Image (tube, rainbow, N blue to C red):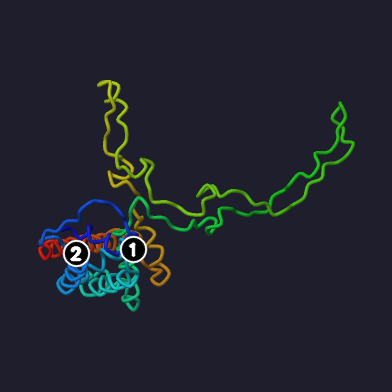
Amino acid sequence: MKLEASLKHFSPQGMHISDDVKGTSPERLTGTDVMAAIGTTSSRARFGLAAFFGKTGISKSDEQLAVQALARHAMDSAPRNVRKAAAGEFGWCMLVLAQFAFSEYSRSAETSVTCHSCSGSGLTSQYEDVIKHPGVFNSDGMEIVPPKIRHELVRRTCAACNGKGELLARCRCGGKGEVLDRKATRERGAPVYKRCGRCSGNGFSSVPSTAAHKVILKRVPELHVRTWTRNWKPFLESLVVICYREAQKADDAFQRITS
């Protein structure tokens, strides 16, 4: 049984009345068996299980535990150049990198964040010159009544989120990870799809590493872009890989326990 299949036991449905006969095989796993397997998996792969449950939104505490464990790993395995550049802010920097790494790991096409342009309101405000009355002019263009213009606060629909108040990570391909290959479709006469070039087939956009760099600059202002690209960015990407690797270990352990 895959770890992903255990999620249905965290959101039980209402009573379903039907004439279907439930499985009576002695090998059938009950909810109690699944919870016991999760407990055993937790003792064998705690970090991976916490990362998975934090990613799926099952437990906020598991998400915090995973970030803390990832931060400790970052402090233990950080390259010498990263330690030297962080100096006295080393612990704080590793926590920031762990947060960004876990955010990238748990990202999906359904991930949404509050729009930074409108702060979630869906509207932006700015002062503009508003024409209250266009004025009156004769046929020669001479002004008879001057126009009335007021400098007022104008609220408009946010262009960044289109008034929704949130930004989705979903790619333009609709989260499918593939788009129509128009050239191949014309040649074959039937729809042909190819991997989306924008998201590389993931279905969603990644968190830019420059976002983490901007946060780090608040405490380490002398961190140059070249140093970030050469030393910090590869280390941040390695932390993301660790999340996937540990989650896979938890999945493997759960499958062994429930087999």
| Residue bearing the label numbered 2 | 30
Say whether marks 2 and 1 touch (CB < 8 Å): no
Percent position (x, y) of residue 146? 86, 41
Which image quarter: residue 138? top right
| Residue bearing the label numbered 1 | 57
Percent position (x, y) of residue 254? 15, 64
The residue at the far right in this view is 144
Percent position (x, y) of residue 188? 25, 21
In-image side of 95 versus 120 (left or right):
left
Total label count?
A: 2
In-image side of 256 versus 186 (left or right):
left
> Is there any visible trace of residue 227 in the rendered image?
no
The residue at the far front in this view is 19
- At numbered mark 2, what does the secondary structure look like: helix, strand or loop? loop
The Cα–Cα distance between marks 2 and 1, rounded to whole angstroms, is 23 Å
In the rendered view, tell whether residue 185 sits above or below residue 227. above
In the rendered view, tell whether residue 102 sits above or below residue 117. below
Which image quarter: residue 259? bottom left
> Are there few (<14), some (14-19), or many (20+) residues within 10 Å of tag 2?
few
N-terminal of the pair, mark 2 or mark 1, is: 2
Residue type of the residue flagged with mark 2: Thr
Residue type of the residue flagged with mark 1: Gly
- At numbered mark 1, what does the secondary structure look like: helix, strand or loop? loop
